[in-house]
Amino acid sequence: FQIGSLFAASTESSAHNSFKERVARSIEGDTILTLKQLTPVRLIKNTFYDRVAAAEHRGASKEELADLLGKRRSKLGIFDGNLDEGELEIGQIAAAIDTIKPAAGIVEVLWQEYEDAKRNLLNSKSSA
């Protein structure tokens, strides 16, 4: 279980507010696993992703994909807030994120879910 996406869209995250808001607006199917030849990455679909998909569809080499990705593509999307041309990398859980919360609130919810799961496990063992 990975939770980086929750914190990437948190109030304290250094990501651009436009990126965080795009994550909070995402719905199921807005992300896709791509760039498998280089290093698999899940992206929110945008103009940049369309170019990646077209390149992959025509059988682009690793070098061509790396050139398309460039050195600053994720900075452009995530930190500069360019939602069209930037790489919008986020986890599959993005569709479940509907608000930008403080990190403390995220930790609080995670802790409560842990406590609930632990209590349910103990209850199920004692009733068995």
Image (cartoon, rainbow, N blue to C red):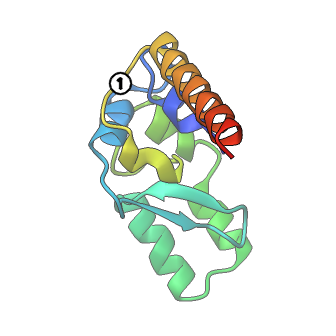
Q: Is residue 108 left or right of residue 45?
A: right
Along the viewing direction, whichever of 100 and 17 lies nearer the viewer: 100
Residue at image location 67% in from the left, 62% down from the top: 40
Examine the rendered structure and indicate whether residue 23 appears above or below residue 95.
above
The residue positioned farthest toward the bottom in the image shown: 58
Image quarter in which the N terminus is found: top right
Seen in the picture, residue 35 relative to 4 is either above or below; the reply is below
* Residue that badge 1 annotates: 100
The residue drawn where x is 35% and y is 59% is 30
Residue 94 x %, y %: 43, 46
User: Which residue, as the protein is rendered here, is positioned at the far left?
Assistant: 25
- Inspect the image, locate mark 1, and give the three-letter code of the amino acid beneath it: Ile
Provide residue 17's location: percent of width, then percent of height: 35, 25
Residue 88 in view here? no
Identify whether 120 is placed above or below 10.
below
Query: Callout 1: few (<14), some (14-19), or many (20+) C-alpha neighbours within 10 Å?
Result: many
Residue 7 spot, x, y in % from top left: 53, 27
Question: Residue 107, percent across and down?
Answer: 55, 18
Q: Is residue 110 left or right of residue 122?
A: left
Q: Nearer the viewer, residue 96 or 84?
A: 96
Q: Secondary structure at mark 1?
A: loop
Q: Is residue 7 visible?
A: yes
Comparing 84 with 27, the one in front is 27
- State how many labels appear: 1
49 relative to 95, above or below: below
Q: Quadrant of residue 66?
A: bottom right
User: Residue at the location (44% across, 29% down)?
Assistant: 9
The residue lying at 35 percent from left, 58 percent from top is: 46
Q: Is 78 on the left-hand or right-hand side of 95?
A: right
